[in-house]
Amino acid sequence: MKILAIETSCDETACAVTEGFEVISSVKITQEIHAMYGGVVPSLAKRDHEANIDFVINKALSEAKTTIEQIGAIAVTMGPGLAIALGVGIAKAKELAVKFNKPIIAVNHVEGHILSSLIDNKTQISFPCLALVISGGHTQLVLVKGFGEYKVLLESLDDDIGEALDKGARLIGLPYPGGPALENMAAKGNFKRFQLPLPMAGKEGGAFSYAGLKAAFSRLVKNVGEIDEQTRADLAACYQEKVFKHLIRTINICVQNLGMEVKDLLVGGGVAANNTLNKQLVEWGDENKIRIYYPSNKLWCTDNAAMIGVVGGIKAEKNQFSEINKVDRRARWRVDEAL
Ligand code: KG4
Ligand code: ZN
């Protein structure tokens, strides 16, 4: 069954046509207006989603050489995300569902990130496995018992990993989004030049925590004072190294204490686009005999509608369609919470 998927939870207006784990077309517009504010402004996100939603839907359908009549169901992100931004995609999905008499499927955005490494990927994963969702708004290690069966094992007590990278980047004068800017800068730097504390969240590694590291980085940047290009690169390298070290250390403690064997770890979310982290996670996986699955294309790391379509396809197969009047924006919706 072909799925038309719509995603408007944050600052990307996206639409895709998918079938099973295959992406037939995927279109997204990344809103650039937020860069000048250093973060996403919800009212501006809503305005831009409204301006672009018809365009991305029409483009996704035409690139897929598909008419809306040939679509089996409409999948839409219902949450978590910015309420007024989610509302734009949901209203459009409902409008199309009624007009063309199509079933609708409400999708959890985090479930999309969890399964994004399976897009266009033919390998069979074995359940239970783990999923790591690392983005601007999420830092979660999730136990995946099967499709649609999740248990959040770890999350952040305060800032999320992408948010920590964005804030750190800003402290040294890099543009938003900070993750990619910091990655480029860090590649030219020496991470050993400065000392920063490694966060020890929950002592036994029971959670992630980035607020303390960011505060320490802010103090370090103030102490350094005037920053030349090499110093900026060294600061970036030092901060990024600690952000990733804390991530992997915390996951490692959790996995060692899990009490069950897992063979696969699925990675998703915008921060998965980072090559340095990719290398470190694969090394950790090799040491622990855990296979690391990355999205086959960086397009599937940051927010996109293809991953929403893949979840929609799995739900359609299980006949898990939603009642149209129950599909409503849900700004907070944990992936292990029932619909
Ligand atoms: O998944 P995403 O598009 O949105 C959320 O659901 O939050 O993730 C956006 C986050 C931003 O914090 C951005 O800085 C980060 O992903 N990001 C990266 C890279 N590309 C995007 N972080 C590190 N390295 C990258 N290459
Ligand atoms: Zn996301």
Image (cartoon, rainbow, N blue to C red):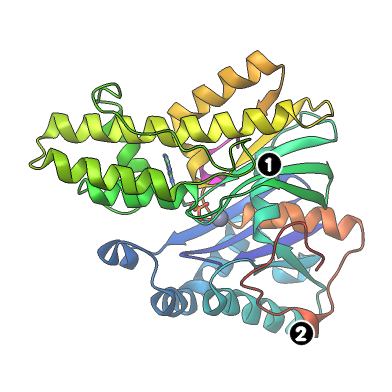
Q: Identify the residue shown where x is 50% and y is 59%.
A: 28
Whether residue 293 is visible to the viewer of this picture, yes or no, is no
Amino acid type indicated by mark 2: Val
Spot occupied by residue 237 in the image (x, y as percentages of width and height): 31, 30
**Could you tell whether 30 is left or right of 304 in the image?**
left
Q: Identify the residue shown where x is 78% and y is 49%.
A: 151
Spot occupied by residue 70 in the image (x, y as percentages of width and height): 77, 65
Residue 297: name its quadrant: top right
**Could you tell whether 98 is left or right of 92 in the image?**
right
* Pointers 2 and 1 in contact (C-beta within 8 Å): no
Mark 2 close to ligand 2, CB under 8 Å: no
Mark 2 Cα shell of 10 Å, populated few (<14), some (14-19), many (≥20): few
Residue 266: name its quadrant: top right
- Mark 2 or mark 1: name the one nearer the start of the chain: 2
Judged by depth in the image, the label closer to the viewer, 2 or 1, is 1
Q: Which mark is residue 119?
A: 1
Say if the magenta span includes residue 270: no
How far apart in space, not on screen, are marks 2 and 1 (Cα)? Answer: 29 Å
Identify the image quadrant of the N terminus: bottom right
For the residue labelled by badge 2, is the local secondary structure a helix, a strand or a loop?
Answer: helix
The one of 300 and 57 positioned closer to us in this rendering: 300
Whether residue 131 is visible to the viewer of this picture, yes or no, is yes
Q: Identify the residue shown where x is 53% and y is 35%.
A: 247
Q: Which residue is mark 2?
A: 98
Mark 1 Cα shell of 10 Å, populated few (<14), some (14-19), many (≥20): many
The one of 86 and 236 positioned closer to us in this rendering: 236
**Could you tell whether 317 is left or right of 272 in the image?**
right
The span shown in magenta is 293-300
* Residue 17 versus residue 9 in the image, above or below: above
